Amino acid sequence: MPFVKLPNGMTAHVKVAKPRAHRCAGLVKCTDGNAVRCARSSAYQCDWPITGDKTCDAHLCAQHAAEVGPGVHYCQPHLARHRKALAPGGLFSRLGVES
């Protein structure tokens, strides 16, 4: 544990906080029908583009991270939007973009 020398000549112990692990933002349905945060340790972040070079960045565990491409993961709400855009008659099919 680090110590700091104070101006009056005394020393003080400095408590260093451990960095907090990011927790999954995915939702888990309970038996009573309510949804709660998953809270597992995060291994991924959502790569859904928001604006410019920014992405959603929601923290996700392996169970809630949907891999849509090599190294590209989406959270559940953005995965639903992605699937809707790829569906026949969706945005990408109207634009002539192939997945």
Image (tube, helix red, strand yellow):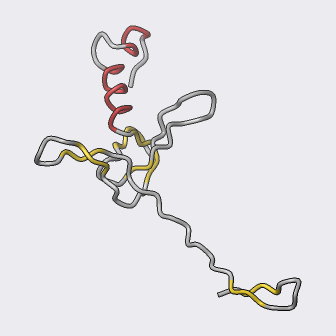
Horizontal side of 8 relative to 22 (left or right) equals right
Q: Residue at x 35, y 32 (%)?
A: 77
Q: How many marks?
A: 0
Residue 3: quadrant of the picture: bottom right
Residue at the bottom extreme, as displayed: 10
- Extreme front residue here? 8
Q: Is residue 13 left or right of residue 49?
A: right
Quarter that holds the N terminus: bottom right
User: Residue farthest to the left?
Assistant: 31
Measuring from the top left, give residue 86's x and y in whole percent.
34, 21
Question: Where residue 64 sits in the image (x, y, percent)?
Answer: 31, 47
Give the left or right position of residue 58, taking residue 54 as reference: left
Q: Nearer the viewer, residue 5 or 82?
A: 5
- Residue closest to the eye, 53 or 40: 40
Give 8 or 73, whichever is nearer the viewer: 8
Q: Residue at x 43, y 17 (%)?
A: 97
The percent coordinates of residue 99 (x first, y second) are 38, 25
Q: Is residue 21 above or below residue 98?
A: below
Q: Give me the residue at 69% from left, 86% from top.
A: 13
Please tell me in which quadrant of the rendered image residue 67 appears.
top left
**Viewer-side residue, 51 vs 92:** 51
Point out residue 57 in the picture as x, y percentages from the top left corner.
Answer: 50, 43
